[in-house]
Amino acid sequence: MVQFEVPAVIPADPQANITDLLADRVDKTPNLALFSIPSGDGWSDVTAADFQSAVIALAKGFVAAGIEPGDKVGFLARTTYEWSLVDFALFYAGAVMVPIYETSSPSQIQWILEDSGAIAVMVESAEHFARLDEVRGELPLIRETWQLHLGAIDDLTAQGADIEDAEIQRRRGLANGDDIATLIYTSGSTGRPKGCVLTHSNFVELSRNSAKALDAVVTTPGASTLLFITTAHVFARFISILNIHAGVRTGHQPDTKQLLPALGSFKPTFLLAVPRVFEKVYNSAEQKAEAGGKGKIFRAAAAAAVEHSTLLEEGKKIPFGLKLRFALFDKLVYGKLREAMGGNVVYAISGSAPLGPRLGHFFHSLGVVILEGYGLTETTAPATVNLADKAKIGTVGPALPGVGVRLGEADEIEVRGINVFKEYWNNPEATAEAFHDGWFRTGDIGSFDDEGFLTITGRKKEIIVTAGGKNVAPAALEDPIRANPIVGQVVVVGDQRPFIGALVTLDSEMLPTWLANNGLPADMPLAEAATNDAVRAEVQRAVDTANGRVSRAESIRKFTILPSEWTEASGHLTPKLSIKRNVIMADFADDVARIYDEPTATTTVPLG
């Protein structure tokens, strides 16, 4: 059994809880800007001391409203400064937050609040409240509801004016490391969400050890990050808490359509994103160059970037000709992309899905080191991550300090350590099934190199076994296809079928630019584009690229382009933009059947 375990570099403190991270930060650097809030065209800083004062004042409001230590409070809101304020105020009040994704449906909201036993809930907007109101009658335990846009924070702060500081200090010290800090429900990509019990130690010990492992990232002069992925997800939630511990300034931009202007004014030193974001940045730049008649230059620059980074990683000498081309493209292409991201980005942390070596090398040549990592809700986000001084593009890095990773039966990745959750809430059967000899079974399949760098090769439950007995990992085909600018999402099919097929959706944001660049009407409806010969040929090129990386038995023989998109709203994507494979397979069963029922010539792969 292959196993890599890295000892913790910070001694564990079983009595510490998350509030200690903020208290320690205030003691060390009370005047350090921990947050920046949008203010006109710029940003207004919030110091560590000011943030703690606001946290304590809001915690008093929760106490005055009847929230008791251990009570669970639901929270449904976008990614804003108020998210961390409410989060820490609940910690200081001794309560337990139950985050709810901002895109959750009324039935999902009901399930999470009902299953968790929440007695109160805070939402951000009237639209959020309307969804809650649809199921409010089915939630008898909910005693209080608050709405941020109606002044909930100011009202609660005023309500708590008479609560003594000593009461908040008493409450914030009640929880020890083994106590529940938060109850985060899985995104539900494989069924009904399960509540993951994450403890104070999970966050405290992982933050303290990760800050050491990621020292170069969090101690970059003026270290800062702009969060735009949902803080309801454990990935951004952990980074928010890590930033407080490490003294990193954090900004928020919940509207991704305003991301580029926000990056330009905030100028972060590192980013936190899912691979789809990096694909969008690359594809948008490529199509913009194409529209300006500079597509050939961009593609040459991209090829030079990948070649340059690959040689550097391999420790090989850069040929003189490549040096000249690289210097030229740095002025023409790379520098402009750096400025588009704010000009100061040195690192980017990527998770939730494989990034792919091409994008990793491309951004590396831009001066942005993408540190791919791996983890789940059950591992408080990261279990492995590439480090600034120890990174390999195409892998998700080595285990973090305090974490062990091994390969179990059928190369399933198993994890144990300071980051592994305590249990599934009210679900002892699922908890027992999830552990093997004290190791958490992730359900993902991977491989290690000799230095302990992990590569994710697929998901155990998603492995397709064709009628001929060939095992196929869908991700190996889906990821390169999804990198194409006009492809939105893709699901590979073929379990117990004679060959591999695929369902493909188009990217409605990128499609108009691509159509215009290829002499077609930019306003072509999605349904018409799905049957257009040029569009199908472009998708075929993406499929051919993916097929070139696998054996013939694993290659996609036929594909169908759907006339609609898969989104969070349609119920086919999770909040971190992962596909809900079981839902898609159920909703599009007829389309899958037609792949095998109807003869068609949509591929260059011979049927033999």
Image: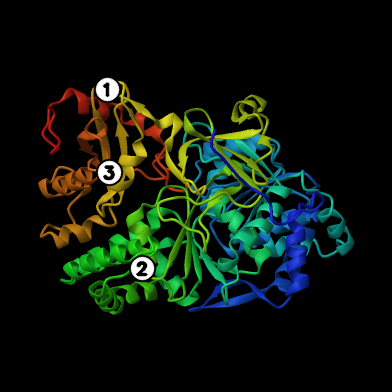
600 sits to left or right of 93: left
Across and down, in percent, residue 393 comes to 41, 56
Across and down, in percent, residue 586 comes to 36, 28
Which is closer to the viewer, label 2 or label 3? Answer: 2
How would you rate the neighbour count of disc 3 (Cα within 10 Å): few for under 14, some for 14-19, many for 20 or more?
A: many
In the rendered image, which quarter is residue 340 located in? bottom left
Across and down, in percent, residue 161 comes to 82, 65
Q: Amino acid at mark 2?
A: Ser
Residue drawn at the location 59% of the way across and 58% of the way down: 239
194 sits to left or right of 67: left
Q: Amino acid at mark 1?
A: Arg
Element under disc 3: strand
Out of 147 and 511, give the one closest to the viewer.
511
Residue named by callout 2: 365
Residue named by callout 1: 497
In the rendered image, which quarter is residue 87 located in? bottom right
Across and down, in percent, residue 417 comes to 66, 43
Residue named by callout 3: 505
Is residue 433 visible in the rendered structure shown here? yes
- Label 2–label 3 contact, CB within 8 A: no
Instruction: Tally the marks.
Output: 3
- Label 1–label 3 contact, CB within 8 A: no
Which mark is first along the chain, 3 or 2? 2
Q: CA distance from mark 1 to mark 3?
A: 22 Å
How would you rate the neighbour count of disc 2 (Cα within 10 Å): few for under 14, some for 14-19, many for 20 or more?
A: many
Which is closer to the viewer, label 1 or label 2? Answer: 2
Q: CA distance from mark 2 to mark 3?
A: 31 Å
Q: Amino acid at mark 3?
A: Thr
Residue drawn at the location 12% of the way across and 39% of the way down: 604
